[in-house]
Amino acid sequence: MLEKLFDPASVAVIGASRTEGKVGRAVLDNLLESYSGRIIPINPKADEILGLPCYPTILDAPGGAELAVVVVPAVLVPDALEKCGLAGVKNVVVISAGFKEAGIEGSKLERRCAEIVKEHGMRMVGPNCLGIIDTASGLNASFAASMAKKGNIAMMSQSGAICTSTLDWADARGVGFSKFISLGNKADLSENDFLLEMEDDENTAVIAAYLEGVKDGPKFMEIAREVSRKKPVIVIKSGRTAVGSRAVSSHTGTLAGSDEAYNAAFSQSNVIRADSVEQLMDYIRAFSSQPIPDGRNIAIITNAGGLGILTADACQFAGLSLSSFNEDTIGKLRGKLPSAASLYNPVDVLGDARPDIYGFAIETILDDPNVDGVILLTSPQAMTEIKSIAEVVAKKCAHTKKPILCSFVGGTRIEEGEAILNRHHIPNYPFAERAVASMAALCDYGVMREHEYVLPEKFDVDKEFVSSLLRDAISNGRRTLGLESFDILRAYGIPVVETLNVKTLQGALDACENMGYPVVMKVLSADISHKTDVGGVRIGLENADDVERAYLTMMSDVRRYMPHAVVSGVQVQKMITGGKEVIIGMNRDVQFGPLLMFGLGGTYVEVLKDVSFSVAPVGVDVLKKMVSSIRTYPILTGVRGESPSDIASIVDTLCRVSQLVSDFPEILEFEINPLMVLPEGQGCVAMDIRLTLGGE
C-alpha cells in the first residue's frame, strides 16, 4: 500500500528554492497553498525559505519526513536518495529530469537510482515527472500551475504536459480528481502499482491514464482485469503507428504492430481505450458523474429534427439501440406534447419547446423500462430558454439511476446553460457524436464488469518431444523451421495433412504412387518464407507426368528467384479439397508476449488484411470472439447455400496453438498458412507451417 505517498504527515522538498520561477520554489508554493502537514525545505545554501526552517540535508532535519520530493540536478539525485534512505524516508518523488530520456549516461544514472531505492526499501515516483496530487489530503507535491478540484477521478500520465492540460481543462468545467500522478520514467513505481493502489481507494470511482507503454504487459493485464470489475479503467495509448523494432518475415509479424497488441490486451483485460485526449476527457466526465446503464437501449430527446437524425445514426454506428417505447409512454407523450411533435425515438419536442415540456419528456421517457439511458439535445433557437432547460435537466438527473448525457449545441447562447450543467456535474458535449461515444463507453463497461474470465484450456500434449526438437534446432543453428516441423503440430494434437518429405524427383514419384493422387508438391527450404512467391508450390497433380513436370519447373523457378536458397527437397501432400483456407499466426510482442492472429488464409491475408488478434494464453470465449470478429466471417458460416465450415475445429486449433506458443517462449514467430477448414463436423487440416526461433 502507498498510503503514506499520498497522505504523508510530513514532506521534504530536496532542492527547495527562494527564487520564483524555479521548480523547487513552485513545489514549495503548491505545498504551502493546500497541504496541512509539516513542510521541510532542504537546501544547503539557505537557513529558511518562505518562513520555514531550511536544512542542508534530509539527515539534518529533525524528525525526518514521510515523503521527499527531489528537484536537484540529475547527477545529485543518487546522493539525495541515499540520504533519504538513511533518514528513514519511505516514499520519494523525483521530479528531476536528465535520466534515460537523455541518453546512455542518463540511463546509467536512472538504474543507480532504482538500485538505491530498492536497497533502502523505498518506493519512487519518476524520475522526470511533474509530481503527484492527492485532493483528499490536500497534497500538491508537483509543479502544476494549480491544485486539482476534489473529485472521484484518479488520473495518471506519462506526459507532464498532458497532466497540466487536463488539470486546466477540468478546472474550467468543474471536473474534480481524487489523485493526479505524473508517472515519468517509471524507474520504480509504474501504472501497475497505481492500479492496485486505486482499486480500493474509497475516494476514487474512475481510473484514467495516458500511457506511452506499460512496464510489464502480462502483469498489467492481470491487474487491470481485476480492477476493472470494480472501477472503470480508461486509457489513451500513444504511439499507435509504431512498429516492432525486430525485423519480421511472416504475415503475422508484418500485420501485428504494437498497437494491435495493445488493442488485444486492453480488450482482454476490460480496459476502455480512448482514441484521443479529447475522447479520454469526454469519457471521464461521463463515468465520474453518471450511473452505468443496465443495457444499450437509448432514447434521444431533441428540439431539432436534424440533430436527432444525426444522433440516431451515430448510435447505430456505435452499437447502441434506439429504445422502443411501450404504449403507456407513447400515450403520455401524445397527451402533453404538441401535435406536430415526434412521439417516437428520437423524440422531437420542437424548436419552441418550453422547459416544462423538456422536463415532462425527460421524466416520462426515463420511467419507460425499455430505456437504459437518455441523450438530450438542445439547439439554441430564438425561443429556446437555455438556462431554464439546463436547470430542469439538473433536477431530473438528481432523481434517476439512468445516465443522461447532454449536447447543447452552439456557442455563446448555450454558455449559461452549460455552466449550470457543469455545476451539477452533468456532462455536456459540444457535438452529439461525442455524447453518443461516451454513452457507448458507459454501456460497454456495463457488459465488461459482468464478464467472467475463462481460464485457458490445458491439453494433454507431448511437450518434451517439442522441447527436444527445438533444442536440437537451436543447437544446430537452425532458426527457421518449415514443412519439416509438422511433428510439432502433431505433438499438440493439431491435425496435419498427410505428407512425405523427399530429396529427389524419383523420391517424389514414389511418394505420390504410395500416397495416391491428386497431390500437392512444395519446395523444402528454410530460406524461403513465402513459397508461392517464388514458384515453390504446385497443386492438383493428377499423375506421374504432372509430378515430373512440376518438379523440374519448380526447381528451375526457385533457382531463378532465389539462387542462394538452400533447397533440401520437396514435400508431397495429399490434396485436400472442399474447404476454406484460414491463417493462424503468432508474433511475440515485446510488451505482452505471444500475440495470436487469425484471418482468411492463403494469399487473401495479404490483400484483405482482415485479421484479429489476441494475447496468449487465452480462453476459449475470447478465441470464439476472435474468429467471429473478422469482416469475412460470414464466408465461414456459409453464404449462398454453401455448407458452414467447421468453426469449432478452428477454435480448438487456436486453443492448442495458444498453449504451444505459451509453453515455448523461444518461438518468436509462428504461422499455419493455410489451415484448411472442412465443412462442419469434418475438422480442419494444417497444410503448411513456419516458425522462427530465438534463444541462445
Image (cartoon, rainbow, N blue to C red):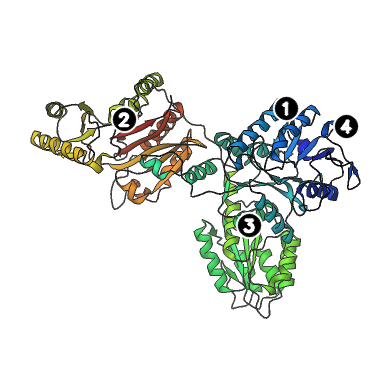
Question: Label 3, on which residue?
Answer: 282
- At label 4, the amino acid type is Gly
Q: Nearer the viewer, residue 55 or 145?
A: 55
Which of the image's four quarters has the N terminus? top right
**Closer to the camera: disc 4 or disc 2?**
4
- At label 1, the amino acid type is Gly
Residue 492 image label: none
Question: Label 4, on which residue?
Answer: 63
Which comes sooner in the sequence, label 3 or label 2? 3
Which comes sooner in the sequence, label 1 or label 3? 1
Q: CA distance from mark 4 to mark 1?
A: 19 Å
- At label 2, the amino acid type is Pro
Residue 121 image label: 1
Which comes sooner in the sequence, label 2 or label 1? 1
Which comes sooner in the sequence, label 3 or label 4? 4
Q: CA distance from mark 4 to mark 2?
A: 70 Å
Which of the image's four quarters has the C terminus? top left
**Disc 2 crowd, CA 10 A, few/some/many (<14, 14-19, 20+):** some
Give the residue displayed 75% in from the left and 54% down from the top. 145
Q: Nearer the viewer, residue 531 or 93?
A: 93
Whether pointer 2 and pointer 1 mark residues with C-beta atoms closer than 8 Å, the reply is no
- At label 3, the amino acid type is Asp
Relative placement, left or right, of 318 versus 362 is left
Q: Secondary structure at mark 3?
A: helix
Question: Label 2, on which residue?
Answer: 495
